[in-house]
Amino acid sequence: MRVEDADAAGLVAAGDVIDVLAAYETHAETAAERVTVLTKAQSDEGGLLVLATTTGQAASLARAQAGARLSIAIHPR
């Protein structure tokens, strides 16, 4: 998944567990809960996180990425 905020992407590392939040114009929702970060690539424009998901979580993330601004919440280690 793409994270627009490069600083947020910089806070996660492989093995971290995160929730992915989707903010639409009228509401926000959790697109995927308790997914594990496998790896990341980061640039000034944001970051790309590769996540271990179920098929259902992957579909939810694809829908959210098409129409929402995505952000992350990091679970404590």
Image (cartoon, rainbow, N blue to C red):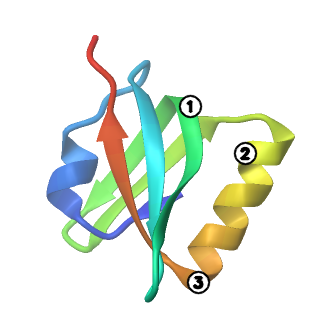
Which residue is at the far front? 26
- Left or right: 44 with respect to 46? left
Provide residue 57's location: percent of width, then percent of height.
Answer: 72, 45
Q: Amino acid at mark 3?
A: Gly
Q: CA distance from mark 1 to mark 2?
A: 9 Å
Which residue is at the far bottom? 25
Query: Element type at marker 2?
Result: helix
Q: CA distance from mark 2 to mark 3?
A: 16 Å
The residue identified by callout 1 is 35
For the N terminus, which image quadrant?
bottom right
Q: Mark 2 and 3 residues: CB-CB less than 8 Å, in contact?
A: no
Query: Element type at marker 1?
Result: strand
Image: 52 above or below 68: above
Q: Earlier in the sequence, mark 2 or mark 3?
A: 2
The residue identified by callout 3 is 67
Provide residue 18's location: percent of width, then percent of height.
Answer: 42, 34
For the C terminus, which image quadrant?
top left
